[in-house]
Every structure is written in C-alpha cells, then in structure tokens.
Image: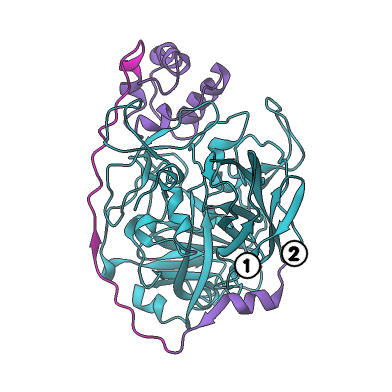
Chain colours: A purple, B cyan
Amino acid sequence: MKWALPILLLAVTACDQSPAVTFTDVSITLPEDKGAFPDRPGRQAMIANCAGCHSPSMILTQPRLSEEHWKSTIKKMREVYKAPINPADEPDILAYLTSGEAAAQ
Amino acid sequence: MLSRRALIASGVVGAAALPALAERFADLALPGGPSARPLGPIFPQKGEMIVQRVHPPLLETPFDVFDTGVITPNDRFFVRWSGGVMPTSIEAKAHRLTVRGAVKQPVALTLDEVAGAGETIEVMAVNQCAGNGRGLQEPRVGGAQWAHGAMGNARWRGVRLRDVLDKARVSSNAKRVRLAGLDTPMIDGAPQFIKSLPIDVARRDDVIVAWGMNGDMLPLLNGYPLRLIVPGWFATYWVKMLSDIEILDTDVDDSYFMAKTYRMPAIPVAPGDKDFPTVPISSMPPRSWITSHAQGARVARGRPIELRGIAMGGDAGVARVEVLAGGKAIPATLGRDEGTLGFRRWTLSLPPIARELVIGARCTNANGVTQPDVQAWNPSGYARNVVERIMLVPA
C-alpha cells in the first residue's frame, strides 16, 4: 500500500460538532421471490436441491458454463456450504445446468 | 423528458422480447448473455434497482443513476449479501459490537458507546464490489453477473475504527483485525462471512465504523446499524451489520473468505489453469466511465459532443482523465474534488464527428496508475478496470 498522507487528510472532514445520533429499531420485510426455474428436464431436482438457499435467478443469470464448472460448483455447494444435495439428483441437476441457454425462459 | 438516448443509457428496454415476469427490464448487454434483468420487485428503503437475485438480495444500480451526480442516493445504492441469512430487523438497544481477541480488555459496546468512542467524522468514498463488471469479462466466468452497477459513492459518517479498538486496549502484538456482521451461514457448518484487515489499515485515519450515509442512517440492506468503511479497498471488507471485531496476533487469517476466495492470481493465468499462487483482493485500481452517452448513442452531425462521466482513483485520488478517440488522448476537465476517494465528475467537449467513432475514458490516479487498454483475465472476474469504450454514431 502506497498511502500519501496529504490525500488522507483531505479525504477526512472532521465535523464541526458531534450531534447526538439516535439509533432506532428498524425492521423490513423482504419481497417474495416470484422467479422460477423454467420447465425443462431436471427442473424438479433444481427445486429440491438448489432453490432452498438462493433464488433461481442466481443460476438463470449465469452465462453458458462448462459441465466441469458446474460439477465444481455442486462440489463447492456441498462441501463448503453444506448443501444437502442428493447424489442421486446430481445427473438431473447437471443436465439442467448445461442444457439450452442458461437463461432460456 | 425521457429521450431515446436516456432510455438506452439507462438500459431500460421494452419487455416484448424478454421474460414476462416483471413489467420493466434492464438490458445489461453482457457478451453472450443472458442480459435481461427485472427492475423489480422493489425492496424496502430502495427505489428501482436491477434485481440480480431476490434471495439473498443482489441489487444493482441502474447505470443512468451515475450520470445524475457523484453521490449515489441511498435508495439506489447497490446491495450485495453473501450466501447466508441476513437479519431483517435490528433492535437498536440490543445491538452490541464486541472487541475481543488480542486485547487487554474485551468489550461489548452499545451503539451509543460506539458513537461516543471518538470524534464523529464524515468520509466520502466509493464502495465497489470486487466483482463489479464480472459479467463483461470474456471468457465469461461464474458468479454474480454484474454490469457496472455494483458500486456507489457516498458520504459515510461515523467514528474511526481505531477509536473503537482502543476501547479494548489492543495488544502491542496485534497483526490483523477480523470483522463479522450479524449475517450467519444458511446451513450449520458453512463458513461465516468474516474478513480481516492488516492492523495498519484498520488504524488508518479514514477507516470508520459508520452509521450515517449521505445524511441519513444506513438503509438496513446496506448494513444498518453499523458498517465498516475502508476507503480505497473493495467492498468485501466493508462488513455490514458489524457486530464483532477480533484482534488477531498473527499475519495469517485462514478463514474461508480470506484464505479460499476473494483472491486474485499472483501471476498471469489463462482459463483452465489450476494451482497458481493467489493473493487476497484488497485495494482498488482507478476506473472511469462515460455516463452521458451509451453504446451506439447517436450524435448530431456538425456539432461538438458534450461528454460527461465519472472517475475514481481507487486507492488514491484522480490525477487526470483522458478521452481516447481516434488514436488521441484528449484531456478532460475534472470537476470539483468533493472527496478524494469518491467519484469525480469529468467533462469534455469532443469535436464533431463525420463517421462512427469508438471512444473510451481513461483515468490515471495520484499514484501514477493508469487504466489498461487490455486487462489480464482472472478466474473470478475481480477488479475490472479496463478502459470502457462506446461507439458514437453520427445521425
């Protein structure tokens, strides 16, 4: 890191006074996800194994990627993120991920 | 008035040829696609955003917002939550920020105690996702498929992190500062999203624990009640809903999001390469964008073209911006410096054109680092800063 001290001094503006800040309770309701996996072979396996943790759009917005890439993604989801992916569903999941246009709706 | 050009610049296109789930879509023009993204649903405390993912939220700022000024409004500021569970409510009195580890006196601070830990200061800085522009890199790679809108610039208000650390009397052998927020892994046993900074960065004059953003409180989706601000560094370190600080007495942090991901190749690599050395992603390089005209914009013949854009210096201020056009590098006029590590406005009146012309903006920062014409590919699509080009078409 090459940090130039004068730049840092310019970047920081001390406030004239420190008006009291009031922290309030905040609560939000996240919108419902109406996105869905388009119907093609393997859809049920996608719903059962993938959609529990993240929106279908995470997958549907991906570019065309290799089967090797998707295999390593499944491995990462299982081993790192502990996703309970049913090994018996894996061929269907892979078929879905590599079929047609990733975003074909 | 919404001109055709503005419509194109905003990426808003007709929904006729696109998926029929929302009424409005953005076309991100990602090479090879898919490029259509819904502009809904609308999220709490947010206006219209490009919805990359509803759950957990990934919301991109529509590009036309960047033409409206150097400050990104809170309700248009991008949102990125990792793959865990993010709390949807904050009880202010119950929130604690713990400081523990290599300290003489572990503490659990209330929000009022954090706010009173030192002088309240305001810092303007760009918050940019390491993967901003990932969807534009070729060959394409997996991950959140952002165009340019996983970034924003704000005035952040808070207290210096070092003043908070001093409450716990950090040991003299402290090496790193590890930060955690309230978000938790989706499934037990998965890694928590924690990040760490070298102690000298953590103690910098402009690294703050913020609650304020552009004169208001942080939106919950942007990390209310507390968010770490690390000007010049990628957003992955700007931990949201900050709740725990652990001082490490070792230089090595083997936690997942430091040791296994958010890393860049240390050597040039090609698609398919494996087992190359990597380093954690850290500070940002300079970038710039043309915001007044979009790809394929039509311009009036015989008239000068009034170009406008934004630039950022990354981990140093903006020294200059040039517009590359027809083999020339034409200096642009910089707007006022409103905050060294924030966005900087630039303008340039380009002579009339008689035929199609490809132009690009190129920023050089105060450290002498210039945006490259061609950027090395990397397998995670991180740290894009290649010169961004558009074609102008005389009409």
**Residue that mark 2 sits on:** B367
Q: Residue under mark 2: which chain is it in?
A: B
Kind of residue indicated by mark 2: Asn
Which residue occupies 52% across, 42% down? B298
- Foreground residue, B67 or B288? B67
Mark 1, other Cα within 10 Å: few <14 / some 14–19 / many ≥20: some
Q: Quadrant of residue A5?
A: bottom right
Which residue occupies 38% across, 51% down? B183
Q: Residue under mark 1: which chain is it in?
A: B
Q: Nearer the viewer, mark 1 or mark 2?
A: 1
**Residue that mark 1 sits on:** B334
Q: Is residue A43 magenta?
A: yes
Question: The residue tagged with tag 2: helix, strand or loop?
Answer: loop
Mark 2, other Cα within 10 Å: few <14 / some 14–19 / many ≥20: some
Q: Is residue B77 above or below residue B147?
A: below
- Foreground residue, B120 or B191? B120
Magenta part of the chain:
A17-45
Q: Is residue B334 magenta?
A: no
Q: Position of residue B276 (x, y in %)?
A: 73, 35
Q: Position of residue B243 (x, y in %)?
A: 41, 62
**Residue lying farthest to the front in this orientation:** B302
Q: Position of residue B353 (x, y in %)?
A: 64, 46
Q: Quadrant of residue B21?
A: top left
Q: Is residue B87 above or below residue B40?
A: below
